[in-house]
Image (tube, grey):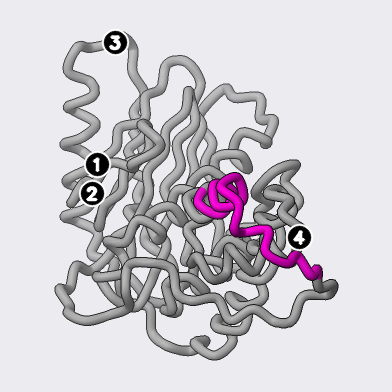
Amino acid sequence: MSLLRSLRLCLVARTGGCPAGPLPLQSPQPWHTFHAGHWLSSASSKDLLMKLRRKTGYSFVNCKKALETCGGDLRQAESWLHEQAQKEGWGKAAKLHGRKTKEGLIGLLQEGNSTVLVEVNCETDFVARNLKFQQLVQQVALGTMLHCQSLKDQLSTYSKGFLNSSELSELPFGPERKGSLKDQLALAIGKLGENMTLKRAAWVKVPNGFYVGSYVHGTMHSPSLHNLVLGKYGALVICEISEWKANLEELGRRLGQHVVDFVRFECGEEGEAAEAE
């Protein structure tokens, strides 16, 4: 039996913080300006504005500007908004760099024989409870899972790996995997106005005859991904089994809980968590 390190976050209640909704986008001047006239006065154009607003979450002012800039093309307007948000996010990230990120969430994602555990940090518990921050944790977990599944191991026993902040930030993400997780981080910083860090990740893959038990303290289920669990503390436990037992899931959960209680590793602490074999 192997005990994989536990990723643990401190739970500190705080007040204040940034608003939950997206911040106004201070967009630079567009490369090309379209003089669209009064096209937004039509009902169909207003429908486009509402659709873009619902899809992106940006303000009506910025959605209107995007549609005018792109001549009413919804797809181009959405891409333009994301480009401006990316620039805004990188600018904010540079300004906020160095501010301590002692709060956040861990994300636990299991798919088939692969399991990942990720840690994403922010400044306040208020932002950690924000849906947009939770979506960032989901994106990081998905990116780590893609990385784990891309490793073509010939499994005779379990395999495991760890990613530090730099390695995690460089993982590809998005359509055709042309973007990276650090791009998603910049977008989240631009929207929520707090410094954030992609702290670390752990992954395991097991063959038949092994089982990955897990425990997450302070469990919150992802609003859009049924097999992703969010929380403040988490652990993975790899069990070698001779036969399947009905209570194996509960056993794995309890063992994981003991790991969390035993390994006191706080969010934001430098260094690596201890491993126990």
Q: Earlier in the sequence, mark 4 or mark 3?
A: 4
Q: Dot 1, how many residues are within 10 Å of its Cα: few (below 14), some (14-19), or many (20+)?
A: many
User: Mark 4 and mark 3: span between their CA atoms?
Assistant: 58 Å
Residue under pointer 1: 215
Q: Dot 4, how many residues are within 10 Å of its Cα: few (below 14), some (14-19), or many (20+)?
A: many
Instruction: Tell me the chief SS of the magenta region.
Output: helix
Residue under pointer 4: 70
- Residue 273 located within the stretch drawn in magenta: no
Q: Earlier in the sequence, mark 3 or mark 1?
A: 1
Residue under pointer 3: 244
Three-letter amino acid code at disc 1?
Tyr
Q: Nearer the viewer, residue 25 or 145?
A: 25
Three-letter amino acid code at disc 3?
Trp
Total tally of numbered discs in the picture: 4
Q: Nearer the viewer, residue 82 or 75?
A: 75
Q: Is residue 91 visible?
A: yes
Residue under pointer 2: 259
User: Mark 4 and mark 2: span between their CA atoms?
Assistant: 54 Å
Q: Nearer the viewer, residue 162 or 130?
A: 130
**Which residues are the magenta region?**
34-50
- Residue at image position (66%, 71%) is 84
Q: Dot 2, how many residues are within 10 Å of its Cα: few (below 14), some (14-19), or many (20+)?
A: many
Tell me, yes or no, whether the two marked residues, 1 and 2, touch with CB atoms within 8 Å. Answer: yes
Q: Nearer the viewer, mark 4 or mark 2?
A: 4
